[in-house]
């Protein structure tokens, strides 16, 4: 499973979202099996990737579940915050099942 967090240095909400996922990364990677990859991209440093992946809203979080061949996209602070717990639970269950 890949969790990709897209942020911008100019967005006032992005530092909080980024920190939440950095904290989640520590909790998930605390497990003995490591099957979840976290990637943090900023618009200023990765503009081509933002365009290629059609990232129109900042912040955005993509969850690429390779084992079930599914891609989930959460856009905007509210949607990310509403789904934060389920994202972490899915990451932890992915860790335990592999």
Image (cartoon, rainbow, N blue to C red):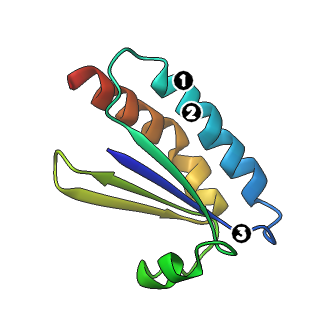
Judge from the rendering whether residue 44 lies leftward or rightward of residue 54; answer left or right: right
- Position of residue 94 measured from the top left corner of the image (x, y, whole percent): 29, 31
Q: CA distance from mark 1 to mark 3?
A: 24 Å
Of residues 43 and 79, the one drawn nearer to the viewer in this rendering: 43
- The answer to the question of whether label 2 and label 1 lie on touching residues, with beta carbons closer than 8 A, is yes
User: To which residue does mark 1 refer?
Assistant: 27
* Sooner in the amino-acid sequence: mark 1 or mark 3: 3
User: To which residue does mark 2 refer?
Assistant: 24
Q: CA distance from mark 3 to mark 2?
A: 19 Å
Work out which residue is located at the far front of the displayed protein and give it: 45
Which quadrant holds residue 84? top right
Instruction: Indicate the quadrant containing the C terminus: top left, top right, bottom left or bottom right.
Output: top left
- Position of residue 86 measured from the top left corner of the image (x, y, whole percent): 44, 38
Residue ID at (41%, 42%): 37
User: To which residue does mark 3 refer?
Assistant: 8
* Sooner in the amino-acid sequence: mark 3 or mark 2: 3
- The answer to the question of whether label 1 and label 3 lie on touching residues, with beta carbons closer than 8 A, is no
Structural crowding at the residue carrying mark 3, measured as other residues with C-alpha within 10 Å and reported as few (<14), some (14–19) or many (≥20): many
Of residues 75 and 2, the one drawn nearer to the viewer in this rendering: 2
């Amino acid at each position: 499973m890949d969790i990709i967090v897209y942020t911008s240095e100019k967005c006032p909400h992005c530092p909080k979202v980024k920190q939440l996922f950095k904290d989640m990364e520590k909790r998930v990677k605390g497990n003995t099996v490591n099957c979840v990859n976290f990637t943090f991209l900023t618009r200023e440093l990765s503009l081509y990737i933002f365009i290629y992946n059609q990232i129109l809203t900042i912040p955005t979080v993509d969850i690429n579940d390779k084992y079930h061949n599914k891609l989930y996209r959460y856009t905007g602070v509210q949607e990310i915050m509403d789904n934060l717990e389920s994202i972490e639970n899915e990451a932890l269950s992915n860790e335990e099942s592999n």
